[in-house]
Image (cartoon, rainbow, N blue to C red):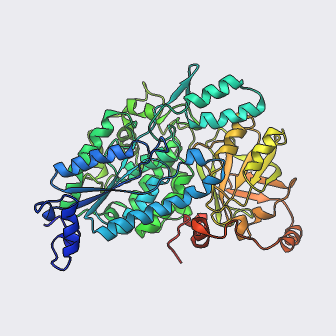
Amino acid sequence: MSLNKYSRTLTQEVSNPAAKAMLYGIGLTSEDMNKAQIGIASTGYEGNTCNMHLNGLSVHVKKGIQENGMVGLIFHTIGVSDGMTNGNDGMSYSLPSRDIIADSIENVVGAQWYDGVIAVVGCDKNMPGAMMAMARLNRPGMLVYGGTIRSGSYKGEKLDIVSAFEALGKKYAGTISDEDYEGVIRNSIPGAGACGGMYTANTMASSMEAMGLVLPNSSTYPATHEGKKAECLAIGAAMKVLLEKNICTRDIMTRKAFENAMTVVMALGGSTNAVLHYLAIAHAAGITFTLKDIQDISDRTPLIADLKPSGKYYMEDVLAIGGMPAILKYLLSVGLLHGDCLTVTGKTMAENLAEAPDLNFDTQKIIYPITQPLKPTGHLQILYGNLAPGGAVAKITGKEGERFEGIAKVCEREEEVIEYISKGEIKAGHVIVIRNEGPKGGPGMPEMLKPTSAIIGAGLGKSVALITDGRFSGGTHGFVIGHITPEAYKGGLIGLVEDGDEIELNVPERKMTLKVDEATIAKRRAAQPAPVLKVTNGVLWKYAKLVKDASEGCVTDEP
C-alpha cells in the first residue's frame, strides 16, 4: 500500500506542477516525491519553560521520521503560558488558545496534504488543542509530550510553580520574610519542562498515554531526561507502522479510550481542566461523552495517587516507581481500564503493558492500592442545584471535607480576592464567589490559581470555600467548585448572589444551593441590567461570540 495517500496530490498529480516545484525548492529530491510526508507541529517558543525546548525535540522527531524513509516537515503553532498569565488579564487568552492551536494544526495539515501528523506539545492547552485537531483530521497521528519539569529547591524544601503563587498568600499573612519570598520565586522553576505536579499539563499527558496517543512512558520522562530524546527518535518507526496499517486517530479515540483517559485523571487526582478538554476532544472525535459519563467514571474510580497539589510527590518521582506504564498496568489488573483499546504502537493497551514493571506497594508510597485508597471515589465531582442547573465541577480530594455551609463574599473579578485577602476581609466561613469569569463573560474562562493559592498561603484553605463560573488550574486545591453553568453573563444565578447570602455546598448529594427565596431572586433578576461583553473586537470578541458553555467543553466549532 502506498504510504503517501494524501501528499501524492501535490507530488504525483500532473495538475499541480507549482506545488511540486516548491517542494523541490525546499530541498526535496525526486526520491522524496514518492515518500510519505509527515507534518511535525511544534508548540515551541522561547517565552515559557514548558515550551522552550520543544523546537529542539521536534528536530529529533524529524530525524526519526527521515531515518524511517519518510519526509518530516516542521511547522509551528502558538502557545500561551498559563503559569505566566494566571492572575492577570493575559489569562483570558489561555483557553481560546486551545482552539486556535486546534484550528491552526488542522489548517496546515489539511492545506499541505500531510499523510500524518505528530504534535510536540508542552503546556496546558497545547495538548488538548493538538488532540482536537488530530481528531478532526482523522489521519495517522500521535503526540510527543515535552516532559515534566524537575522540582526546584530552597532551604531544603522542594518547590514548583504553585510554591511561588502560595508565597504571595504567605506574604499577605506576614508568615514569610522578604528574603524567603524572593528565594522561593528565584528557585521554584529550575529549567525546561511543564509544571511538576499533577497539574493540567501532566494530567493531560498521563491521560493521553492512557488513551494510547503517545508512546509508552512519554508522560513519565522529565524534559531533561535522555529518555525523552530517545522517544522522539523512536517516533519515526511508530509513525511508519500507523501508515502501513492505516491506523487513524479515531481508530484510537474510541469511547473506551475516553473512559481510560478519564479513569487515569480520577485515579491520579488530575486537573478539573481535563473535564473541559475531554468534552471538547470527544466532540471533535464524534464521540458522545457528557458530564454524566464523567461522574460515572468518578463514582467507580478511587483516588490512589499522593501527587501535588493536594499530595506530596511530583511527576518526576513517578519515573522511579516504573513510570506511567506501571500505573496503567496496575489499573488494568484491577479492572479499571479497557485493555483491548488500540494504541499508536499498533498494539493494544494490554499488549503494551505486558512487560511493564509492577508497582511495589511495600517500597513506594506514591500510588496506593485500591483496597486502601486516599479517597474511595474520584476527586472530581459534578454538582448541580439552583446555582448550577447546567452542572459545575468540584475538586474534592477528601482533605477539605465534603460539605461546606457559609456566607457569600462576592467578587466581581478574581483580582478582588487578592485585594480582600491583603486587607484581611476574607474570613473563616466565607464562600468566596468569583463571577463574570465564564467563557463569554470573562471572556475566555480564566483560571483562578492566583486567588486559590493566595487563600492557601494565607492559611485559609480549610476554612473557606470558593465557587466560580471561571475555571481552575491543575495546581488549585482546597474546597473549590468551578465551571458553573450557566455563567453569570448568561443569566446564571451566580450573578445574583449578594454578600451575606447563605450558600450550602454538598458534595455527597452533588448540590450547590443558594439559600435565598424565589421572590427575592426574582426581584434581583428584574433589577439586573442586560449583560455587556467586556470586549468589542479581536480574538476575544470572536471567541465570546462562538464559544459554547463549559458543560459542552467550551467548543467553538458548533452552531
**Residue 369 higher or lower than 38, as above or below:** above
Between 107 and 271, the residue placed more toward the observer is: 107
Residue in the foreground of this view, choosing between 338 and 183: 183
Horizontally, residue 406 falls left or right of residue 325, namely right
Q: Residue 351: horizontal and vertical position, in percent?
A: 26, 48
- The quadrant of the image that shows the C terminus is bottom right
Please say whether residue 335 is visible from this viewpoint. yes
Determine which quarter of the picture holds residue 176: top right
Residue for point 55% across, 34% down: 160
Extreme-top residue of the structure: 155
Residue 537 spot, x, y in % from top left? 62, 70
Specify whether 214 is left or right of 477.
Answer: left
**Residue 254 in view:** no
| Viewer-side residue, 355 vs 274 | 274
Q: How many marks?
A: 0
Relative to residue 398, is residue 494 depicted above or below?
below
* Left or right: 251 as drawn, with respect to 530: left
Q: Quadrant of the N terminus?
A: bottom left
Q: Position of residue 169 (x, y in %)?
A: 72, 35
Is residue 517 shown above or below 66? Answer: below
Residue 197 left/right relative to 483: left
In terms of image quadrants, where is residue 284? bottom left
Residue at the far front: name it: 25
Q: Residue at x 20, y 57 (%)?
A: 71
- What residue lies at 58% left-to-right and 45% top-to-bottom? 84
Residue furthest left in the image: 31
Q: Residue 38 placed where, x, y %?
A: 26, 59
